[in-house]
Image: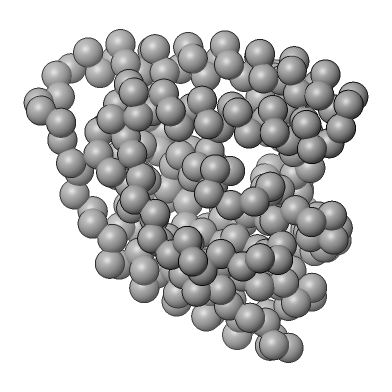
């Protein structure tokens, strides 16, 4: 049963991404706002199908901490869930991602329409310069930034090393930082087609103001805020009956 659910969800993702990409391409010819609204529907569809097929829902705490101005969302990274859910929780965003992802048919082409910050991680110095330049541009355009400082998805209970890129953009631009912590990896594990029912807990911390502080100091505060909230989240799965293979 689990594998049938996984196949049904994956099939829905593939079909919907093709449809949404084609609609977004048409929408882009009319207006950027229309294109963004169309792309948002893919995230909405995927989150909805997760709730229908798997019974995965979310409990969001701290919505009152979302600033009114374009900000930098810095979050732990455990699964693909957050890349979808954040689009429904926060204003229009641009994501920091690997440039190679843009080559994936339909999905990558669709990502390129969201004004991402695409970098080549192999060239670290050039990547940081590009990150700050592109990040500053997106903020001026009124887009929020989403950055996962761990770089790649980490299993629950084992946070990765936090990189300073997000803090660097904040220090350069003065944009507020919104620290986010969640336990999505408990229900949608890394590198697994299988997903498990339950309620994902997500905490939006109080925004962190730059106030002329240095990058390293700011990065330390951001990491501490995320890890503190992460340590308070439930780590056990909620099961809806017995899951059969």
In the rendered image, the vertical position of residue 154 relative to residue 69, given as above or below: above
Q: Quadrant of residue 157?
A: bottom left
Residue at image x 79%, y 42%? Answer: 115
Location of residue 19 in the rendering, given as x and y in whole percent from the top left corner: 66, 13
In the image: residue 39, left or right of residue 162: right
The one nearer the camera, 17 or 3, is 17
Q: Could you tell me which residue is drawn at 35 percent across and 58 percent down?
A: 158
Q: Looking at the image, is 47 positioned above or below residue 214?
A: above
Q: Quadrant of the N terminus?
A: top left
From this viewpoint, is residue 184 visible? Answer: yes
Image quadrant in which the C terminus is located: top left
Nearer-the-camera pick, 42 or 104: 42
Q: Count every numbered label the image shows and give the total.
A: 0
Q: Measuring from the top left, give residue 184's x and y in whole percent.
A: 37, 46
Return the residue found at the far bottom.
Answer: 212
Check the image and report above or below for 131 versus 48.
below
Residue at x-position 90% and y-position 24%: 29
Q: Residue furthest right?
A: 29
Q: Residue furthest left?
A: 242
Q: Position of residue 205 (x, y in %)?
A: 46, 69
Q: Quadrant of residue 237?
A: top left
């Amino acid at each position: 049963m689990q594998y049938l659910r996984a196949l049904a969800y994956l099939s829905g993702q593939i079909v919907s991404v093709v449809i949404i990409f084609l609609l977004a391409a048409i929408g882009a010819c009319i207006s950027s706002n229309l294109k963004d609204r169309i792309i948002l529907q893919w995230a909405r569809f995927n989150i909805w199908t997760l709730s229908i097929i798997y019974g995965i829902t979310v409990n969001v705490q701290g919505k009152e901490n979302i600033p009114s101005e374009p900000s930098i969302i810095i979050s732990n990274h455990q699964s693909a869930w957050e890349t979808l859910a954040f689009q429904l929780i926060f204003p229009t965003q641009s994501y920091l991602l690997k440039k190679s992802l843009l080559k994936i048919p339909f999905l990558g082409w669709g990502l390129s329409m969201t004004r991402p910050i695409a970098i080549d991680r192999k060239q670290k110095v050039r990547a940081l310069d590009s990150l700050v330049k592109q990040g500053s541009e997106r903020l001026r355009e009124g887009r929020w930034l989403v950055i996962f400082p761990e770089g790649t998805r980490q299993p629950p209970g084992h946070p990765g090393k936090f990189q300073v890129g997000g803090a660097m953009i904040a220090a350069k631009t003065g944009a507020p930082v919104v620290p986010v912590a969640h336990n999505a990896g408990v229900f949608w594990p890394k590198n697994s087609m299988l997903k498990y029912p339950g309620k994902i807990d997500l905490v939006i911390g109080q925004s962190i103001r730059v106030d002329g502080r240095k990058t390293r100091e700011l990065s330390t505060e951001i990491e501490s805020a995320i890890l503190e909230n992460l340590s308070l989240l439930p780590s056990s799965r909620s099961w809806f009956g017995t899951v059969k293979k």
